[in-house]
Amino acid sequence: MRVLTIFNLKNILVLISIFSINVSFSQKKDFTLVLDAGHGGHDSGAVGFSINEKDVNLSLVLKIGALIERNHKDIKVIYTRKTDEFIPLMTRADIANRNKADLFISIHCNANARSSAYGTETYVLGAHRNQDNFNVAKRENEVILLEKDYQTKYEGFNPSSPESIIGLTLMQSVHLENSLKIATYIEENFRKENRLSRGVKQLGLVVLVYTAMPSVLVEAGFISNYQEGRYLNSEDGQNTIAKNIYKAFLSYKKEYDKKSGGDELNPEVVEEKEKPLENIRLKVQFLASFNKYSLNSAQLRGMKDVEIIKANGKYVYYAGNTNLKSEGDNILKIAKEAGFTDAMIVEFKEKEYLSEEYFTIELLLSPKKYREKDAVFKGLNNVVRERYSNGYVYTSGKVTNYESARRLLENIKKLGFSDAIISRVPNP
Ligand SMILES: [Zn+2]
């Protein structure tokens, strides 16, 4: 193999000086992240079982970007591509440099002739250490051969030569520490997801050579592996990978903010730290009927965690019981998917005093006319009997807020009234 001098000294000096100016004026308040979906257009990248790398890369990048844009208005996300188009490697780096990006994350998928290979790896720029990594470099770099004028643009860079890269790593070495940091966070998050992390590695990757900011290239998994390929191509798999990289980015950004003295990320906007609602329970109302169905009835279409509350003579069916908005939304989605298209979220103010009505407990419905002292009421007091359709409805108790009604219901159920429910009755 011949040693290439790809960069003449003059070029290196010019780039270094441009780059130092960038550093000295980098007191920005906002943060710019460039997300780079590898390959695109006539460059499919690696090809797996009916999956193209370029499509998985794009899908992942859009999901990561969406998470950041939704939760962090102060972060500018720039995409090197948002569609299936061919973008030269140099242009990808140019986009990041032109926008004075603070971080560059390139997303790729791996492939190996051995279909048993699987797992994730994240690369920062460096000289190739071994042949195995070099194959990745070759594959990810070779795309420049698809670019018409690559010989002038890349100054004779030869993607097949390991030596080709050594002179170039100088440019990125200033950023190595930060690049390693984000790379480590990414692999840590994959590991927490029980994925096989093949680690953080150094490699001479062209797209990282020309970027003037911390830069990493993520190989999110092997599309040449049947199982991992399916994971990479699935909605669930992609959402998880996007979440992992998003979390890694948050950890990195938090440290960046500390160093630059900027605002820390607001912990409330981080998904995991949703604030519970106070004194409010959310339930999804999905059905109202004059019929009282049992909880395992087919009419309820498998809805879980169902509570029935009678109001205005109708049985209203609610699913769930949560003080988290996100969970409420989730249950609503489930109800709609089950075919309850009019389902809606209802707020239960647990301690709210009702002036117009009160709560009682409906013990049972029966065609038989019982008296309070009858054994069927197990010694309960204040049983009220009223006519109802072809028989009678029996109720007991009178409380003024939902929380007390729940407690009363629990106690009555313990006596053996397993079908008892809460009923809302207008004040006389
Ligand atoms: Zn790739």
Image: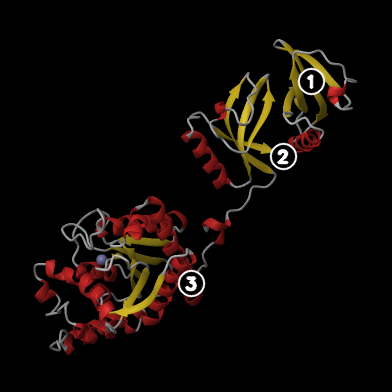
Q: Give the mark nearer the N terminus: 2 vs 3.
A: 3
Q: Is residue 148 visible?
A: yes
Q: Residues within 10 Å of mark 2 (few under 14, many from 20)?
A: some
Q: Nearer the viewer, mark 2 or mark 3?
A: 2
Q: Position of residue 144 (x, y in %)?
A: 16, 70
How far, Cα to Cα, is label 2 from label 3? 41 Å
Q: Position of residue 405 (x, y in %)?
A: 77, 34
Identify the residue at horizontal 15%, vertical 84% (top origin): 6
Q: Quadrant of residue 190?
A: bottom left
Q: Is residue 373 above or below residue 36?
A: above
Q: Position of residue 417 (x, y in %)?
A: 77, 30
Residue closest to the far top: 390
1 vs 333, left or right, is: left
Q: Nearer the viewer, mark 1 or mark 2?
A: 1
Identify the residue at horizontal 41%, vertical 73% (top origin): 182
For label 2, the residue is 350
For label 1, the residue is 394
Q: Is residue 388 above or below residue 88?
A: above
Q: Give the mark nearer the N terminus: 1 vs 3.
A: 3
Closest to the observer, 368 or 313:
368
For label 3, the residue is 257
User: For the residue with label 1, is its CB less than 8 Å from the closest atom of ligand 1?
Assistant: no
Q: Secondary structure at mark 2?
A: loop
Q: Are marks 2 and 3 in contact (CB under 8 Å)?
A: no
Q: Amino acid at mark 2?
A: Glu
How far, Cα to Cα, is label 1 from label 3? 64 Å
Q: Residues within 10 Å of mark 1 (few under 14, many from 20)?
A: many
Q: Amino acid at mark 3?
A: Asp
Q: Quadrant of residue 39?
A: bottom left
How far, Cα to Cα, is label 1 from label 2? 25 Å
